[in-house]
């Protein structure tokens, strides 16, 4: 498989929603509302900006990020550190604004020419139609992640990034759509295993469960 440009984890979560023929981003907002903030945290983790153990963020260091949402997370961690207060992973994810985080990722993809955005109206209300300029990009990312998960002994930084992405896919329940049928079964099993192993994926799953319980109450 030819190498493709690796983008930040929240952006790749969105690109995985691209239809393989027309490239339309069919974004399941209910599934990604917690996964995108989780992707912000996962990107900070793989870039070395934070360390995580269990349910706690155990360390951080500013890296001069140009992502304003990630910068806000690090600013909160710095303030908590001055108070000698440990910051919980669940609380950090909940405090990331969902819609701005998603919108920022879409805006960056559009600015880089990876997607096009059209403003349309439905029943008088405006909405944005996002389309990948290369419709197969979602399939390429999914194939790359599956290939990484098949190499279970690979602990390179690139492999760790794909593992974090896969864990978030599982926490959001998107792995069944991306890896269907008998052929995708080994990848689905690997993804489910990561959801139980990776702290950020577990935190996203807890957040989704809490949202579901609140909505059904």
Image: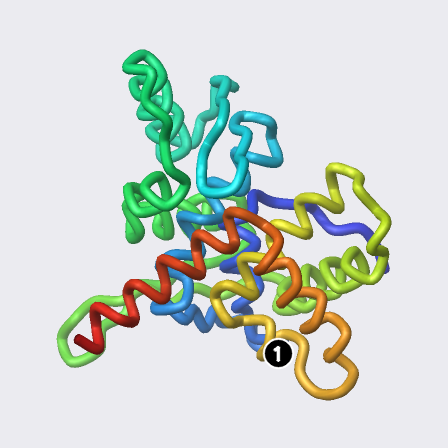
- Quarter placement of the N terminus: bottom right
- Looking at the image, the residue that sits furthest to the bottom is 181
208 vs 84: above or below: below
Image side of residue 194 versus residue 201, left or right: right
- Which corner quadrant of the image does residue 175 belong to? bottom right
* Residue for point 17% across, 75% down: 217
- Which corner quadrant of the image does residue 129 belong to? bottom left
Local SS, label 1: loop
* Residue for point 33% across, 16% down: 84
Given residues 187 and 85, the one toward you in this image is 85
- Which corner quadrant of the image does residue 23 belong to? bottom right
- Looking at the image, the residue that sits furthest to the top is 82
Residue 39 point in image, percent of width and height: 49, 48
Mark 1 burial class by Cα count in 10 Å: few <14, some 14-19, many 20+: few
Image side of residue 89 versus residue 152, left or right: left
* Residue for point 50% across, 23% down: 59
Judging by the rendered image, the residue that carries numbered circle 1 is: 21
* Residue for point 31% across, 51% down: 98
């Amino acid at each position: 498989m030819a190498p493709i440009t690796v983008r930040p984890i929240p952006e790749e979560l969105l690109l995985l929603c691209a239809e393989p023929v027309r490239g339309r981003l069919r974004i399941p907002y209910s599934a990604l509302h917690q996964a995108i903030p989780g992707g912000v945290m996962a990107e900070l983790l793989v870039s070395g900006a934070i360390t995580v153990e269990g349910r706690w963020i155990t360390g951080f260091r500013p890296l001069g990020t140009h992502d304003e949402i990630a910068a806000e997370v690090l600013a909160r961690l710095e303030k908590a550190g001055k108070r000698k207060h440990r910051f919980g992973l669940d609380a950090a994810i909940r405090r990331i604004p969902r819609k701005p985080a998603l919108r920022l990722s879409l805006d960056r993809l559009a600015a880089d020419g990876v997607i096009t955005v059209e403003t349309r109206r439905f029943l008088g209300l405006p909405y944005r139609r996002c389309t990948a300029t290369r419709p197969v990009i979602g399939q390429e990312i999914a194939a790359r992640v599956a290939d990484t998960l098949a190499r279970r002994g690979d602990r390179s930084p690139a492999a760790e990034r794909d593992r974090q992405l896969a864990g978030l896919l599982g926490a959001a329940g998107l792995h069944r759509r991306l890896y269907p049928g008998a052929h995708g079964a080994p990848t689905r099993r690997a993804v489910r295993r990561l959801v139980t192993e990776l702290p950020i994926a577990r935190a996203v799953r807890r957040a989704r469960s809490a949202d579901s319980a609140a909505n059904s109450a």
